[in-house]
Amino acid sequence: MLEPFTKLLDANALVIVLVGTVLATLARQGWHDFTIAVPAAFGLLSKGFDVDATRAALARTVGEINRLGHLGAEPVDPPDKATTELLNAYIRTGSIEAMLKLARSQRLQREINSVAATRVFENAGELAPVFGLVGTLFAITQLVPDVSASAAETVMGSVAGAVLSTLYGVLSAHLIFYPLARAIERKGDREETERTMLLDWFESELTDGRSFPSRARRSSVTPVKDVA
């Protein structure tokens, strides 16, 4: 059953296409972007930003802030590092504006990283068919007669290598590299939407807590009639 697929395996052609694509992409994009793209690709296998767990941690912290104030509150650290930094910025300064400024800076850096990772895989998608052609040309050079094999075997082996190199280049571009670029882009857009909605909710909860003191604070105020 697997025999037709084993005929599609050519180690030399595969090495030329994949290694050539990786090296050419690295030369074009640089090491910095490459170190961003590879973790981003593996990050697709994980859940990523856990909006429910982060909201639960923020909700408990909001309760602490509204009850004790931002200086007396004991924050519950969210599982997301960026959100923890935002929370600490508010706890430290008590300023929503400072927190939002940091949030804008974080979002800009995430967008820069997402664009860099996407560009790496897009370039790899462009270069893979090129190295498929390189593999084809390499296979053609193997048409030199070999004393240990017949002319027909030499020709058929070279033609097979040429065809498989082109095939590997096209398939790796459209089944690996371009899909990875789009998947990273979609995940980034989805996470930014979730982060924005969560930050808006957190800001509104803090504002409501400022406008309407908690029950504990209201009960500690002595009524005017009792003072009289």
Image: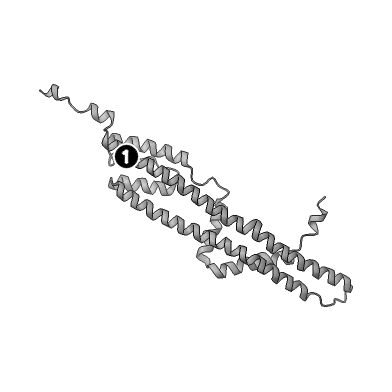
Residue 188 lies, with reference to residue 119, above or below; the image says: above
Q: Residue at x 56, y 58 (%)?
A: 38
Q: Which residue is mark 1?
A: 206
Q: Secondary structure at mark 1?
A: helix
The quarter holding residue 180 reads bottom right
Q: Residue at x 77, y 74 (%)?
A: 140
Q: Residue furthest left?
A: 228
Looking at the image, residue 84 sits to the left or right of residue 33; the answer is left
| Coloring basis for residues | one colour
Q: What's under tag 1, amino acid-wise?
A: Leu
Residue 74 visible in the displayed image: no
Query: Residue at point 42% right, 53% down?
Result: 107
Q: Which x, y percent locates residue 137?
A: 73, 73
- For disc 1, the neighbor class at 10 Å (few under 14, some 14 to 19, many from 20) is some
176 relative position to 48: left or right? right
Q: Is residue 169 above or below residue 66?
A: below
- Name the residue nearer the viewer: 77 or 49: 49
**Residue 57, x across and y down, in percent:** 41, 38
Q: Position of residue 171 (x, y in %)?
A: 69, 59
Q: Position of residue 189 (x, y in %)?
A: 49, 50
Number of labels in the image equals 1
Is 6 left, or right, of 205 in this rendering? right
Q: Quadrant of the C terminus?
A: top left
Give the residue drawn at x 30%, y 39%.
207
Q: Is residue 16 above or below residue 201?
A: below
Q: Nearer the viewer, residue 78 or 170?
A: 170
- Please indicate, yes or no, whether residue 227 appears anywhere in the rendered image: yes
